[in-house]
Image (spheres, helix red, strand yellow):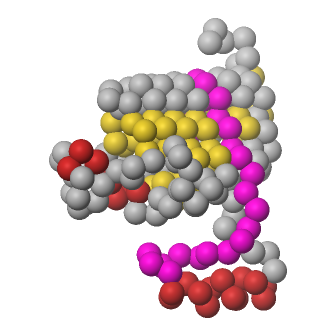
Amino acid sequence: MDAARQLHPDWHPGKIPENVVVDPSAYVGTSYGFSRFRSEAPVGLRIGRAASLCDLTILDVGPRGRVVIGDYALVNGAMIICDSEVTIGDYALIGWDVVLMDTYRVPFDVALRRRALEQVPYESPRRLAADVPAHPIRIARNVWIGFEACVLPGVSIGEGAIVGARAVVTEDVPPGAVVAGNPARMVRNRASDSL
Ligand SMILES: CC(C)(COP(=O)(O)OP(=O)(O)OC[C@H]1O[C@@H](n2cnc3c(N)ncnc32)[C@H](O)[C@@H]1OP(=O)(O)O)[C@@H](O)C(=O)NCCC(=O)NCCS
């Protein structure tokens, strides 16, 4: 194993994939987060200056997936499911157990779903492998996403917006908006904050 791609210390005996570009000042908690990282893009993940990928942040990234994590962004144990593109801006704060998914991974059609489930035992690690559309997620600079929130495919969250804990974000959030609930709705507007 290429020792330069290993983390020290790391409880998981894995390594950082070759197509992951980590700024020397960035922090990655464990290589376990890459167990489901299958991106074949030249740069499948870029982690910016002093950014942090803490605790158990899982990067479930498909062959065409690309993830960008901006400078000083803090990702606190999120699940990132990406088959197209997930962008997290500079100074974004992603709370505990947030789910960012640019694809549902699951076919709506019941026959296709059954076929995908029948294939699960042949995948290693076991996973649902279905051909399902993906739509990029863009999280702008200075966004704060509260714990256990979920951002669905195709959603853009504008600069400085705040997403409440356990919100399900189904549509775009304007810059400076504070949204909460399921589906997420604006509860406040902080667009006048200095950014
Ligand atoms: C979204 C949040 C920032 C809003 O804070 P706030 O501006 O002080 O908002 P308020 O508490 O005044 O609530 C405004 C309204 O939104 C509702 N609301 C606030 N947060 C909510 C949430 N997470 N889910 C559902 N509704 C929520 C309130 O009930 C209130 O509704 P009302 O006007 O009908 O009474 C905050 O509630 C929150 O969820 N913070 C997340 C904290 C977190 O996850 N920390 C982890 C560290 S990363």
Q: Quadrant of residue 192?
A: top right
Q: Quadrant of residue 158?
A: top right
Nearer to us in this view, 65 or 140: 65
What's the residue at 60%, 53% (across, down)? 65
Quarter occupied by the C terminus:
top right
Q: Quadrant of residue 177?
A: top right
Query: In the picture shown, does residue 56 fall above or below 71?
Result: below
* Residue 132 drawn at (x, y percent): 73, 68
Q: Is residue 22 left or right of residue 185?
A: left
Query: In the picture shown, does residue 121 fall above or below 167?
Result: below
Q: Is residue 29 magenta?
A: no
Mark yes or no: residue 81 visible.
no
Q: Is residue 162 left or right of residue 14?
A: right
* Residue 178 drawn at (x, y percent): 70, 30
Q: Is residue 112 left or right of residue 148?
A: right
Nearer to us in this view, 81 or 7: 7
Mark yes or no: residue 31 visible.
yes
What's the residue at 24%, 45% (across, down)? 4
Main SS class of the magenta portion in the image: loop
Q: How many marks?
A: 0
* Residue 81 drawn at (x, y percent): 58, 57
Nearer to us in this view, 110 or 149: 110
What's the residue at 32%, 29% (across, down)? 24
Quarter occupied by the N terminus:
bottom left
Task: Tell me which segment is drawn in magenta.
Answer: 123-152
* Residue 12 drawn at (x, y percent): 25, 60
Q: Is residue 123 left or right of residue 82?
A: left
What's the residue at 52%, 43% (across, down)? 43
Q: Is residue 132 magenta?
A: yes
Query: In the picture shown, does residue 119 fall above or below 58?
Result: below
Nearer to us in this view, 44 or 153: 44
Residue at the far top: name it.
194
